[in-house]
Image: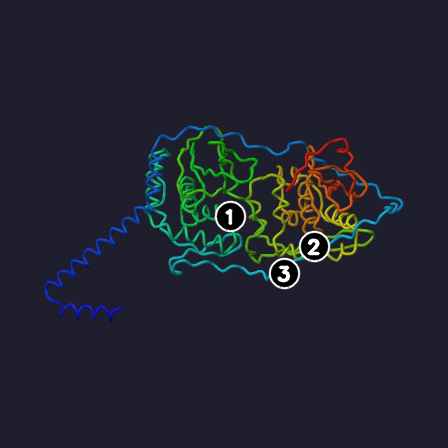
Amino acid sequence: MRFPLIITSLCLICLPALALSEYEAYLQQNTMDMQAAKQEFQDYLDANDKEFIGFLKQQWKKVELEKPQVLDVTPKPVNLPKAPTPIAKPKPHAKPLPIVKVKPIAPAKPAVVAPPVHVTPKKNMLVMEFVGHKISMPKINARTLRFNNKLGSKSIASHWQVLAKAKHSHIVKALKQQRTALNLNDWAVALLANQYAKNIGLNDTNSQQLFTWFLLVKAGYNTRLAYNSQAFVLMPSKQALYGVTYFTMKGQRFYAVSFDGKKINTGRAFTYSGNHESARTVLNFSGASDMAPSGDYQQKKLNFKFDNQQHQIKLDYDFALVEFSNTLPQLDIQYYPKQGLPAHTSQQLLKQLQPLVKGKNEEQAVNLLLRFVQTAFAYQTDGQQFNSENYLLPIETLHYPYSDCEDRASLFSWLVESLLGLDAVLLDYPGHIAAAVAFTKTPKGDRLTFNNKKYTITDPTYINASAGMTMPQFRKTTPTILNF
């Protein structure tokens, strides 16, 4: 860079005075144009913030936070019935049932733990723990980011302006880079933003909530702020949330999401009606089992018996993902089988079950999976184990000492589709969740029709029951069919 500058200065010495004057004028005009372009670019970057601050300064509207939706409160069976053991083998079908077509299992990929993402020199980085990983995020002086005023439209608007003027683009960039590096879903990104707010030294709830709100908006998420006795974050969700207060604006529910498990005060609150132009992404809880593994594996042995043969399944599962799963609010039951198991554990489980179902007909293969889920896991209701309703992801079913009907139905349905390639649905009875499977050739037993397909009832909570057997207390009840 220095050599061309020397040449330029030497050439300038040789220029006539008039030419030099014209050249200086050119440089001056060029500099002014660059500054104008830079200012125009800066104004463009700040335009959304300026408009948004205008929204925030206006009188916030008073809204009524609606009581959270609740899951089925019908008591679940405490003592499970056992299906009678058949005295003799059932008569063979007139035509043999088709042999199950076991789905091929994708080759195992090595579990690579993503390295920390560095966006600035290490001396300016903060190392923090997140979902079992040590990650790096930019350091920032939290003193200027603290909210020290009484909550109100003007004070919040002024604080947004303070946050927007502070250097923050590198923090948002780091947040997005961690999302990619660790394959975080939207909920994990929101948790990371909130945890970062705490780690930089924002110790009071209002400062944490305002900075979390700011980061999520800047990261593109449709996020609002509301307040009553304290500030809290509101986010619309692609999935319905249960046990979470919300308010409805223009037909869209905004949930008062909690990052620490504490319930948000219900009743009246204040919020604004505008929206930051760059914040459009709606919270999506999918992908909860797809995050990069932390390597903190725990072991599980599962024993079950089928056709007088004893089997043992040995699995490793990532405890950090269990802890993350525990932060999820309660979602529709269909959400849980969709998430399946993390790749590492899924590979282990499917590979060990695959030879056990190979060569069997569809009914035998489904019955084996039923017996696995029915008897390899101890039963307790959520009320007994957690003192409240708590749907579990399959990885949580592996971890906790007990599971109940919806947890078993989720794991079983996922196994049927992942291993056998047969379509499964969930059956919602009052106080009970079971499943049903669409066989290629429908076997004998209890069945129902859904979307012009016949499904045979399969209950992974009815101990020793085979396909086509309904738990006795629900034989006269028509369930709601839930497709996932």
Q: Quadrant of the C terminus?
A: top right
Q: Position of residue 205 (x, y in %)?
A: 43, 40
Above or below residue 10? Residue 56 is above
Q: What amino acid does circle 3 point to?
A: Ala
Outermost left residue: 17
Q: Residues within 10 Å of mark 2 (few under 14, many from 20)?
A: some
Please indicate whether residue 276 sits to the left or right of residue 423 in the image. Answer: left
Above or below residue 179? Residue 274 is above
The mark closer to the camera, 1 or 2, is 2
Label located before the other in sequence (1 or 2): 2
Q: What amino acid does circle 1 point to?
A: Ala
Q: Quadrant of the N terminus?
A: bottom left
Please indicate whether residue 373 sits to the left or right of residue 158 in the image. Answer: right
Above or below residue 460? Residue 138 is below
- Quarter of the image for residue 12 reads bottom left
Q: Position of residue 4 (x, y in %)?
A: 24, 69
Above or below residue 73? Residue 343 is below
Which residue is the site of mark 1?
Answer: 188
The mark closer to the camera, 3 or 1, is 3
- 34 and 388: which is toward the camera: 34
Label located before the other in sequence (3 or 1): 3
Q: Residues within 10 Å of mark 1 (few under 14, many from 20)?
A: many
Residue 162: mark? none
- 413 and 391: which is toward the camera: 413
Which residue is the site of mark 3?
Answer: 108
Measure how far apart labels 3 and 2 are at the Cα level.
Answer: 15 Å
The mark closer to the camera, 3 or 2, is 2
Q: What amino acid does circle 2 point to?
A: Lys
Q: Position of residue 208 (x, y in %)?
A: 42, 43
Quick check: marks 3 and 2 in contact, CB under 8 Å? no
* Residue at x-position 70% and y-position 52%: 419
- Quarter of the image for residue 7 reads bottom left
